Image: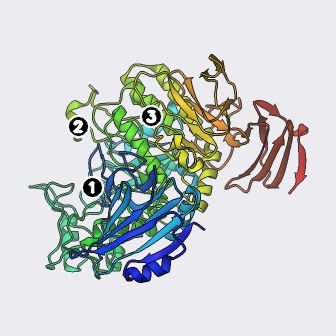
Amino acid sequence: MAVIYKWDLNLGIEEIEAQIAGKKECFTVLSMQTKDSGECHIEIAHDCKAVYGMGERFNLVNQKGLEIETEVVEKFCNQGSVSYCPVPFFFTDKQFGVFVDTLAVTRFKFENKIKIDIKKDSNKKLPCIYFFKGSPTEILADFTEITGKPALIPKWCFTPWMSANRWNTQEEALQQARLAKKYGIPHGVMVLEAWSDEATFYRFNEHGEWQNPEEFVQILKSMGIHLILWQIPVLKKMEQGENHDILDLDWEYAIRKNLCIKNTDGTVYRIPEGHWFAGSLLPDFTNPETIEWWFGKRDYLLAMGVSGFKTDGGEFVLTDDVTAFNGMTGIELRNYYAKSYVKAYTEFVGKDRVLFSRAGYTGQQNYPIQWAGDQISSWEEFRHVIIAGLSAGLSGIPFWGFDIGGFAGEMPTKELYERAVQCAVFAPIMQWHSEPVGGQFSEVLAVTWGVNDRSPWNVSKMYGDEQLLKRLRFHFNLRMNLLPYLYQQAVISSKTGTPMMKHLAVEYPEDERVYDVVDCFMLGELLIAPIMEEGQSGRNVYLPDGEWNCLWPLRVWNEELGEWTEGEVLRGRRDYFVNCGSDRIPVFIRSGSCIALNLGATLELGSFVGNRTDKYVQLTFWAVGERGRYHFFDDMDNELIISWEKGKNEVERLSGEEKFVLFSNGQRIFDTEMTWQKG
């Protein structure tokens, strides 16, 4: 256990000092002062070089030297220091962590001392603080024990996702699914934003755009595609001169039945001017009657086979002067409203469906999945969004994704889009998406025919490059090849709280060289080094301790030898320049490990296996290093233990009958050459 102790701030400082006596192995509480405003100011002496966590952060992974507030904030593109999903939790490189168990906006300052300013809640009480001591994995395990282990998501979530806001008819949406099939690019999820009446957000468009929604859902299912529908937690204020009879009735009912967030004077709260959905009302998800009414209008969507919802927004409480049914005021609701929203939807959809949420707070891992919100299609935003994924993982949120090549503005360059696809293959969720054709940046769109989809086929068409589509197809197929490994890593994350997309400090906490790394990450035993700069065919890579094998052929400049090598095993704790060309990024497998793959008949990476998740074309294992042991399991009752040492390979089958192929250090090992043991 990494928890040192739980500190109730409502105790006197003398009681606290007595409580923590003998437990201050890595820090000292210098002072605790309660201000007239009701805030509590704490100073902690702790010498460190790196601070990780604090929720999804787009500026830096290492927060040392920064001042941060944990307030849910909506910002369209270039998020900077604000966050859709803050978490008042951090840990340092010195095996020390802190979690402030509060819903109130809290201020942290990480300088030579750690300073924390905490508000009292609506009941005029201060929260508890948890202190941790241990490795990053131990601290994350205990933090998620307190706030909830990540809820495991279905296997189909790890297939590629397709989405574009402009798909507002049944025929257009089906056409995109057909194009994916035509071009041999697998997708297992479709997200629709413009599906509803754009007023109630629970009714399919009523003007014939969706001729038969039930049939539409079933057609997608027959193609192996799950449907996710966009949601927003508002009773919308229509534009001047517009009205909607059913929405008008909903407004009247919700106000009469007190189903919305209110101002402290008893009037109904409206989203302020200058903000998204200004003038709209907020359903109060702390009120059981609201929940029954709200989801009663959406039950039919689950009945027809919808697989979940894109729960957008939620960053709508912008003042302390509001109240909810459960007695909370805006002090808590600034952060809790988003959490109450996704919590209610999670309970509605059940465990076999998912959400795709933007806003959240502590415990967001209980309501998966998280997406990184809106970014412009630029190299700078690409770098920022990878930082966001790493920091989310370091805050207990393992199931996360971003919009490939950005969401808004000019179309991504061919190079940016391709590099983003190559990286997204190894992210927890692989999705492309685009803003409305008439969106915020429509005047600068670089698409003469008015289609700004970030689909592989549309980007290839725009640049007139059929070879690009072929190269992209390899990576979408590679994603499906990796599905057994991705799902296994997801299971591990759900049990341990360890992120799928791991910052190197999680695996190598004592290596100071990795503290500030934001351009590499690990997925299980894989180390991924995305190309995140324009015009580069290679990059410098620092490999941590151990031995590393290239996933595919790479030309590597070895400074020690003063020469280029190809396909060699690389020793760790060294810098290399890796030339990967335009169609790959550097990816390495740690020696002594094994990855599970679903490969096509050629047994090659990038081979087509379709988008089914309930069977394998050819289950394949790649083992590397002189010795190692790998425990494989899946959701189809297959469980194996593979061990190898100096050319001897042993497999113990614990359950299942799936046939497989084993490669050991690049050599195919046939069943007849194995030593079999009964499980």
The disc placed on residue 441 is 2
Quarter of the rendering containing residue 4: bottom right
Q: Are marks 2 and 1 in contact (CB under 8 Å)?
A: no
Q: Which residue is mark 1?
A: 197
Mark 2 vs mark 1, foreground winner is 2
Q: Determine the CA span between mark 2 and mark 1.
A: 23 Å
Q: Does dot 1 land on a helix, a strand or a loop?
A: loop
Quarter of the rendering containing residue 116: bottom left
Q: Is residue 630 above or below residue 599?
A: below
The disc placed on residue 106 is none
Density class for disc 3 (Cα within 10 Å; few <14, some 14-19, many ≥20) is many
Q: Are marks 1 and 3 in contact (CB under 8 Å)?
A: no
473 vs 168, nearest the viewer:
473
Q: Is residue 594 above or below residue 46?
A: above
Q: Is residue 548 above or below residue 581?
A: below
Which quadrant of the figure contains the C terminus? bottom right
Q: Does dot 3 land on a helix, a strand or a loop?
A: helix
Q: Are marks 2 and 3 in contact (CB under 8 Å)?
A: no
Q: Residue at x 41, y 28 (%)?
A: 533
Label 3 sits on what residue type? Answer: Ala
Residue 545 point in image, percent of width and height? 64, 40
